[in-house]
Image (cartoon, helix red, strand yellow):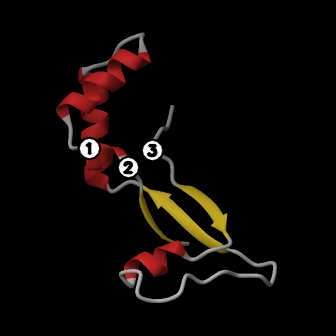
Amino acid sequence: MNCFANHYQNFKYDILSWKDNKYNVPLVKRDNGKEFKFEFYLLEEQKDELNKLMKQYHSKNINLSLRKLSEYMQPTHLFYQVRHA
């Protein structure tokens, strides 16, 4: 099972650019039928830590494994990074 695959999603709003500009510019919406495509990915450091802890706290009960992961890792490593695709 590859939990760490990159994901792609289209949005009508360019929230990433808006955030990168500290919310000081208008939020851009595409109305021409095209959308902004974003890639959701994990850094190698995140993948390494997740893999290590998943092996260490492996259990038949996934909820138990995830609870242990949340106790011993940086919370930021549980979130995808985002960039324009």
Check disc 3 and report its element: helix, strand or loop.
Answer: loop
Residue type at mark 1 is Pro
- Say which of marks 1 and 3 sits in front: 1
Residue farthest to the top, as pictured: 60
* Image position of 3 (left or right of 46): right
Dot placed on the residue nearer the N-terminal end, 1 or 3: 3
How far apart, in angstroms, are the residues tagged by discs 1 and 3?
Answer: 16 Å
Tell me what residue is drawn at x 27 percent, y 20 percent: 57
Where residue 67 appears, x then y in whole percent?
31, 23
Residue type at mark 2 is Phe
* Image position of 40 (left or right of 20): right
* Image position of 4 (left or right of 8): left
How far apart, in angstroms, are the residues tagged by discs 3 and 2?
Answer: 11 Å
Where residue 64 appears, x then y in whole percent?
34, 16
Which residue, given by chain and number where applicable, does mark 1 sit on? 75
Which residue, given by chain and number where applicable, does mark 3 sit on? 4
**Is there CB contact under 8 Å for labels 1 and 3?**
no
Tell me what residue is drawn at x 76 percent, y 78 percent: 34
How far apart, in angstroms, are the residues tagged by discs 2 and 1?
Answer: 8 Å
In the rendered image, the vertical position of residue 9 relative to residue 73, given as above or below: below
Residue type at mark 3 is Phe
Which residue, given by chain and number where applicable, does mark 2 sit on? 79
- Say which of marks 3 and 2 sits in front: 2
38 or 21: nearer the viewer: 21
**Is there CB contact under 8 Å for labels 2 and 1?**
yes
Tell me what residue is drawn at x 45 percent, y 44 percent: 4
* Image position of 76 (left or right of 11): left
